[in-house]
Amino acid sequence: MKLITHNMLTSKSLKGVNVGFPLKICATEVKEVAVDFNPEFVTRMIPKLDWDALCQAAESLGCLNDLPRSVNPNHENDEEFLKKAHHVLLEVEVIEGELVCPETGRKFPVNEGIPNMLLNEDEV
Amino acid sequence: MKLKELESCLQCVEVFKSPKVKLEQYPTSPHIASRMLHTIDTRYKDLDGCMVADLGCGCGVLAVGASLLGASMCFGIDIDKDALDISYQNSCEYELKNLELIQMDVTKLPDAQWNQLFDTVIMNPPFGTKRNRGIDMLFLKTGLNMATRAVYSLHKTATREHIRKKTKEWGVNMEVISELRFDLPSSYKFHRQQSVDIEVDFIRFSFPSSHLPIKCTEKNYLLLKK
Ligand SMILES: C[S@@+](CC[C@H](N)C(=O)[O-])C[C@H]1O[C@@H](n2cnc3c(N)ncnc32)[C@H](O)[C@@H]1O
């Protein structure tokens, strides 16, 4: 599970949960992979993401490095910035661990990089 | 990538070991999958550099193919862990670095989640023949909310007029790209034969420029419980 994926997941469907985002990450295995850098793609994705949640997630995995806490308004021309964003979004992967609902503490397991977001009938 | 090359690549994709009939688990054949993806790529340019989702990805033949054709990110979503495990093996086998897998029920995506987050959605959805009538339309509607460029899907030809009516209501364009024949194992139909051919449409759904997301609250589907 890359951090771009983590940015897309919520526990909002759980009964009684209002926002359910961002899910806390408890990782037991994290891996870094090299992914081809496509500045145009990263630029296009940034406005669709929750930047604070991305920074928090990166920080909790110790891979925030010097990624700025806010998005530079002129980011499409800032290659250094886009490379850092690319790294955090696409190159850091949680292989084993859990995602935790910020409101209820419900845990969603991540195995072999696949988050299991299924809920039981009585949870929705 | 040439069509022939894509097809031979997809021939090595592993498929369901013990398919679950109630989830309508049968793979898109490499022959059909490669033709679908090649058309999406060359005729419509809806894969290269795109953010793609494959709803009900199963063992991932469409998602793997989309990644091979240059999707920047491809997300395979399925309800079944066994299918996703095979997708994962396939993704490792092809050393794909941009294919993400999520175990989730596509019919239970919260309202407005992932609205217009993706460029392109591809799918071979369950047809709704296993006590889950309407699931095909629910997949379609979910895909239409997620995509900004287009949704590519397979539907039984018998439902074409119904889909045409619905897409008109939703303000979405629909283009039947081709008519296919699917050779389904007989377990998917109430037949005695070994397998049965059904007619399937390969359809592209796209948006007029003024398009707004379809309201998810309009639940005009019927999901029959066991
Ligand atoms: C017809 S198969 C297609 C598999 C794969 N996309 C392919 O083309 O080879 C339909 C897939 O939808 C999945 N599925 C069925 N119901 C689902 C649901 N509610 N949410 C997510 N996936 C579902 C099944 O597990 C199965 O893998």
Image (spheres, helix red, strand yellow):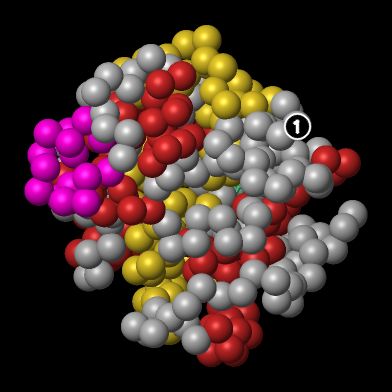
Find disc 1 in the rendering and name its residue: A104
Please check the rendered image and state whether residue A67 is part of the magenta-colored stretch, yes or no: no
Please tell me whether residue B84 is drawn above or below residue B106 in the rendered image.
above
Residue A6 vs residue B185: left or right? left
Residue, far top: A28
Residue at 9 percent across and 48 percent down: it is A77
Pick the residue in front: B185 or A105.
A105
Mark 1 lies on a secondary structure that is loop
User: What's drawn in magenta, residue-wise?
Assistant: A71-85
Please tell me whether residue A93 is drawn above or below residue A11 in the rendered image.
above
Residue A97 vs residue A59: left or right? right
Pick the residue in front: B163 or B127.
B163
Q: Chain of mark 1?
A: A
- Dividing the image into 4 quarters, which one contains the C terminus of chain B? bottom right
Q: Quadrant of residue B131?
A: bottom right
Question: Which amino acid, mark 1?
Answer: Thr
Instruction: Tell me residue B103's x, y (percent).
Output: 60, 37
Please check the rendered image and state whether residue A79 is part of the magenta-colored stretch, yes or no: yes
Q: Quadrant of residue B117?
A: bottom left
